[in-house]
Amino acid sequence: MASYIARRLLSFIPLLIIMSFLGFFAINLAPGNYFDTLKQNPQISQETIRLYEQKYHLDKNVFIQYYHWAANILRFDFGYSFAYKRPVAVVLKSRLFNTFILSLCAFLFSWFVAIPIGIYCAVHQYKLGDKIFSFLSFAGLSIPNFFFALILLYFASRTGILPTGGMHSLNYEELSFFPRFLDLLRHLAIPTIVLGTSSIAGLQRLMRGNMLEILRKQYITFARAKGLSESRVIYLHAVRNAINPMVTIFGGALSGLLSGAALTEIICSWPGLGSLMLEAVRSQDLFLFAGDLLMMGFLLILGYLIADILLAWVDPRIQYQ
């Protein structure tokens, strides 16, 4: 396992290089750059702009720009954000924590709701509860995240029950610890529900299918023939084997939440990596965009690695050579 993890970590390097270069190249295809807006400001001299372009090699072609940026990455220097007037690493650090909080809450919400519902639907196949949850899952898969977010935001604006955006209230700094925590939970509610609903729908259908397949196996029939209680057969034998395929999509679910969080963050005004990506693209902040893309790509690949490790840990039959 240690050698397998080492090989996978080494494979991160070419994948991140290819992904970051494609993103770097794509944003350079757009006409102009961040300094074009500064050239329209009469208070900033053209000489100052040329010095900045030379300093960050923006007067060179895209290959030379990428070479210098990638070389600085080896020293953990992600470049300088022209829009925020701060190092990219500092900007990413603050936004990464916000995205992590949102993704973690949505992840826990979706999995802790979807798994029990999937088990219930499989055990009560074709009964009223199974039909209701199946209908709700199809509805959850059909409704786009952005549309569902707009519906919840409209409901919140009309009722005032939940905040309609942001991460904190205006008086957040004046609150004590527990009121701050409650304020954060209230702001997390809408984006968490939006991100978790679509995940719940897919995970519940997958868990239901896995359970139905396992419940038809001969060893389940044998366990029942031995006189084991139904709850012991289901939760000790069936669930453990049915949940193994779910572990394989752990990384995909995690990365899917991160990618799906981008649009949700924008609509709900959540200050995370997704909304930061939009700001970087709109302002043509080259190094901020590249650093944000590199960070999200790293989390995506890391999620799949964690999924493989967890699968081997849950199922001893799986060994990576």
Image: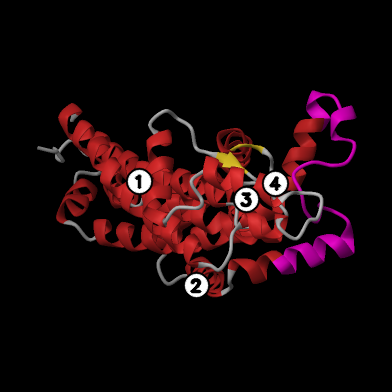
Mark 2 or 3, nearer chain start: 2
The mark total stands at 4
Residue furthest left in the image: 321
The residue mark sitting in front, 2 or 3, is 3
The residue mark sitting in front, 4 or 1, is 1
Residue 250 in sight here: no
Residue 307 pos. (x, y %): 32, 43
Q: CA distance from mark 3 to mark 1?
A: 20 Å
| Residue with the mark numbered 3 | 276
Name the amino acid type tagged 4: Leu
Mark 3 lies on a secondary structure that is: helix
What's drawn in magenta, residue-wise?
150-179
Mark 1 lies on a secondary structure that is: helix
Name the amino acid type tagged 2: Lys
Q: Residue at x 43, y 49 (%)?
A: 65
Q: Which mark is residue 301?
A: 1
Q: Are marks 2 and 4 in contact (CB under 8 Å)?
A: no
Q: Judge left or right: residue 152 versus residue 317.
A: right
Q: Quick check: 252 above or below 263?
A: above
Q: Nearer the viewer, residue 227 or 65?
A: 65
Q: Nearer the viewer, residue 245 or 167?
A: 167
Mark 4 or 3, nearer chain start: 4
Residue 232 pos. (x, y %): 33, 41
Mark 2 or 4, nearer chain start: 2
| Classed neighbour count for the residue bearing mark 2: other residues with Cα under 10 Å, few (<14), some (14–19), many (≥20) | some
Name the amino acid type tagged 1: Ile
| Residue with the mark numbered 4 | 188
Colour scheme in the image?
A: secondary structure
Q: Residue at x 50, y 56 (%)?
A: 259
Q: Judge left or right: residue 307 versus residue 32.
A: left
| Residue with the mark numbered 2 | 131
